Image (tube, helix red, strand yellow):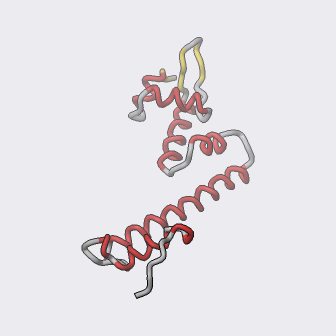
Amino acid sequence: MKSIGEAAARFGLSAHVLRHWEAEGPLTPARDGNRRRYTDAGLDRVAAILISKEAGFALADIRAMLAVQPAPARREIVDRHRERLRARIARAQAALDLFEGGPCPHDDLMTCPHFRGLAADRIPAAHRTRRPPG
């Protein structure tokens, strides 16, 4: 059994991080009176939380995945997260393409016709000013 300080140090964390995870629900250390005690199973849970956070899961999703529930419910959480990640990756790739010789290889982004077109498309039609022809 490890104290909170020992458990936190083992993972390179501050004790307040483990207290926060306990308050948010995904971590439930054993107690010895008022003292938190981390068993091997508790340390495994800290590792699972860290891996999940590194994968971008929110604490609420981590709490739900670590709760005792059927595997399909956990799978649903993972599937939703996978779709959010795919969307984020697509947005990041589009941004990277814009800067790395994609459709806008110009030195000055503000004069790039492609970039200016993207910016114009972001302005709602009701707020665009009409330019006189010619």
> In the rendered view, does 76 fall on the left or right side of 1?
right
- What residue lies at 52% left-to-right and 36% top-to-bottom? 46
Q: Nearer the viewer, residue 35 or 91?
A: 91
Q: Nearer the viewer, residue 107 or 54?
A: 107
- What residue lies at 60% left-to-right and 35% top-to-bottom? 26
Q: Position of residue 127 (x, y in %)?
A: 52, 67
Q: From this viewpoint, which residue is outermost toward the top?
A: 33
- What residue lies at 57% left-to-right and 29% top-to-bottom? 22
Q: Position of residue 18 (x, y in %)?
A: 50, 29
> In the rendered view, does 85 fall on the left or right side of 79?
left
Q: Position of residue 51 (x, y in %)?
A: 50, 46
Q: Nearer the viewer, residue 1 or 103?
A: 103
Q: From this viewpoint, which residue is outermost toward the front?
A: 132
Quadrant in which residue 33 is drawn: top right
Does 28 sit above or below residue 110? above
Quadrant in which residue 66 is drawn: top right
Does 54 sit above or below residue 100? above
Q: From this viewpoint, which residue is outermost toward the bottom?
A: 134
Q: Nearer the viewer, residue 133 or 83?
A: 133
- What residue lies at 46% left-to-right and 26% top-to-bottom? 16
Q: Position of residue 94 (x, y in %)?
A: 44, 70
Q: How many marks?
A: 0
Image quadrant holding the C terminus, namely bottom left
